[in-house]
Image: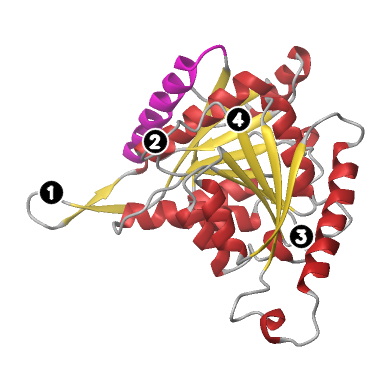
Amino acid sequence: MGHNGRDIHHEEAMMGSTEVTLVGVDGSKESLAAVKWAADRAIRFGGRVHVLCTYALASYSAAALDGGYAVLDDEALKRGAQQVVEEAVEIAKSRGEVRVSSSIEPGDPAGVLVEMSREVDLVVVGSRGGGSFADRLLGTVSSALPAHAQCPVVVVPRHTAGKKFMPVERIVVGVDGSEVPSSALRKAVDEAEGWGARLTAVSAVPIGSGTSMMAWTPNVDHSALLDNVRKGMGEAIDQALHGRTMEVARHALDGAPASLLIEFSTAVDLVVVGTRSRGGLAGVLLGSTSQTVLSHSTCPVMIVPSDHLGKAESAAAPDWGRR
């Protein structure tokens, strides 16, 4: 089921869209849900889905009967990874007319996905809660990957109730209130346009928070501060729209960024935020707040690198479908 990476980009160039979405799978229900999300988006936007499963070398598993340890040889690990990939490919194809390729790679899942993020346009992974080793491993991937990826990353959480994640009809993007549009804002506009979704831009200003300097600093006109944030946000949105006719709801709110994002996630289908930003709602997604949002959001979260230009390094893509 493997597919040569160079052939992928060549084929895309011949068929129109050059977008490649990389989906990391491990056989869990959550990773297969990520496959469905990626396939549905590819059907809507065009492009290809590439399914990837990694396997570790010199791995050991607990023997089921005697509590000892059994060495898993490389071929057994490869066969297991290949079975995971084949199931994921079938699921992707079952969603509709979508081009799907696949590969298996040795190595750490997060490390491999970060490396390959330089060569693709979007990475999609699943996320779940729990305390098992597998849960912690997947949690590590879904939190470490967005911080280091070179392209946008979508983390799809476990769906527990309410409307399905697809189709995407409502999107909220976190902005910092500056007059310059962030990569996250530009990407959110593109996503809303592609989906025909309603877009809401939100800037969080923690005025009333007990831990905020603005909560106790005298002579600060909180109303004027929010007005300035709204003005900057409006200018950034106008630039991001770049002449496109799209209604964008705009809110500057008093509150903690992570809490507001999590609250909005209950009412929308996609939350878009940035990394390594100047500050505000997107800028806090660098440390513990990032993990909090990704852990508690009830809808998929798209994390966009602050320097993302929307183009993968496809011209120099190595043979990442070699196994």
User: Which is more N-terminal, label 4 or label 2?
Assistant: 2
Characterize the magenta stretch by its predominant secondary structure.
Answer: helix
User: Which is more N-terminal, label 4 or label 3?
Assistant: 4
In this picture, residue 65 sits left or right of residue 280: left
Mark 2 Cα within 10 Å, few/some/many (few <14, many 20+)? many
Q: Which numbered disc, 2 or 4, marks the residue closer to the eye?
A: 4
From this viewpoint, is residue 261 visible?
yes
Say which residue label 2 marks: 81
Q: In the depicted view, which residue is nearer to us: 186 or 316?
A: 186
User: Which is more N-terminal, label 3 or label 2?
Assistant: 2
Query: How far separated are the C-alphas under marks 3 and 1?
Result: 52 Å
User: Which is more N-terminal, label 2 or label 1?
Assistant: 1
Q: Position of residue 86 (x, y in %)?
A: 41, 24
In this picture, residue 319 sits left or right of residue 307: left
Q: Position of residue 40 (x, y in %)?
A: 55, 23
Label 2 element class: helix
In percent of the image, x 78 and y 37: which residue is there?
Answer: 316
Say which residue label 1 marks: 64
Query: How far separated are the C-alphas under marks 2 and 4?
Result: 34 Å
The amino acid type of the residue labelled 4 equals: Glu
Label total for image:
4
Mark 4 Cα within 10 Å, few/some/many (few <14, many 20+)? some
Residue range highlighted in magenta = 75-97
What is the number of the mark on residue 176?
3
The amino acid type of the residue labelled 3 equals: Asp
Say which residue label 4 marks: 169
Q: Which numbered disc, 4 or 1, marks the residue closer to the eye?
A: 4
In magenta segment, residue 226: no
Label 4 element class: loop
